Image (cartoon, grey):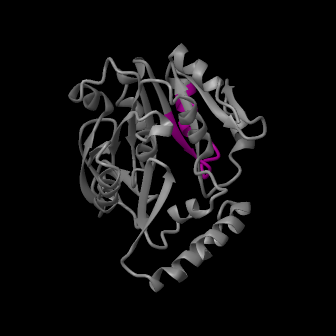
Amino acid sequence: MAFQAGARISSSWAHRGFGVGCRALRPTVPNRDMYVRLNEDAVFAFPFGDEYWSTILDRKYVYELDIDLFLRGISDTDYVLLDCGANYGYWSTLVSSRPYGSRRAIAIEPSSSNYAYLRRNAVVNGDRFETIKSAIGETSGTAYLSGRKHASMTIVDHGEGGDAVAMESLDDLMDRMDLSTKRLVLKLDVEGVEIGAMIGAARLLKTDCVVICEDHGSDPLHAVSKHVLNHTDMQLFCYDPDAGRYIHLKNTSPLDRIKKAVNRGYNVLATSSLFWEARILASST
């Protein structure tokens, strides 16, 4: 009840300060997990008092409303989710559940501690989605992962005190898993290397694919969105909360208004597929 109340109250200012309360309560129940029923066919586990995931204990709060809106809207579509930077597997858990169409999901996560919870969530949901322990980047090889918070780690391609992890390009992954003929939803939340991941997905992005990519509120220059607009053939879309629907971005100026909080991620959708473009524009609250 304390977590629920704190999440509800702090939601008015993008949950600033909520983490302080979570850290204060965490020692009261050490080394235990919380299990949240997301819907009648999905359970999600995370550590007790986790300041990032405890926000979903607020029943009125919808985590990443823009992604949820889009994925619910395409529950009738046969597609494969590539969940890159899956963390504990929230979206893979939902997409593979019945209300979201019971779609195939492949969850990819480089962090050993995150991957342990990713596997736990796969198991508690009947092992219905696949998991891969790897980073995603421009080329296949080795990357270095650092950071203390599971939702805000950093990946670099050279060692600077970080943990060495396997890294794979999306084009190599597509070939290895024979995904070239599949309709794909690619979610990219890959520790600040989203642009490199797209460069390493040149062939994949030409398939029947839509990319859900984080453009963080802390970046006033909107580097990810500018890369899509200036260096790819994809069309760019973003959920506009004022309009209650996705809008087509010809430039990044609307993001100056939409990206209000510097402590959270925002998402843009990009595609060169007319099918996906129509489905994006049909998504509205």
Count all numbered tags in the image, as a single digit: 0
Residue 260 placed where, x, y %? 71, 50
Q: Residue at x 49, y 22 (%)?
A: 232
Q: Is residue 77 at all visible to an observer of this figure?
A: yes
Answer whether residue 223 is magenta in the image. Answer: yes
> Which residue is the extreme one toward the right?
242
Residue 202 placed where, x, y %? 37, 23
Compared with residue 190, is residue 121 higher up or lower down, i.e. above or below? below
Compared with residue 69, is residue 202 higher up or lower down, i.e. above or below? above
The quarter of the displayed image where residue 258 is located: top right
> Which residue is the extreme one toward the bottom?
28
Q: Which of the image's four quarters has the C terminus?
A: top right
- Which region is colored magenta? 212-229
Q: Which of the image's four quarters has the N terminus?
A: bottom right
Residue 7 horizontal side relative to residue 45, left or right = right
The residue closer to the viewer here, 106 or 226, is: 106
Compared with residue 266, is residue 56 higher up or lower down, i.e. above or below? below
Residue 187 placed where, x, y %? 45, 38
Q: Residue at x 29, y 53 (%)?
A: 123
Residue 281 placed where, x, y %? 65, 24
Q: Residue at x 41, y 26 (%)?
A: 79
Residue 219 horizontal side relative to residue 192, left or right = right
The quarter of the displayed image where residue 148 is located: bottom left
The residue closer to the viewer here, 14 or 123, is: 123
The residue closer to the viewer here, 140 or 238, is: 238
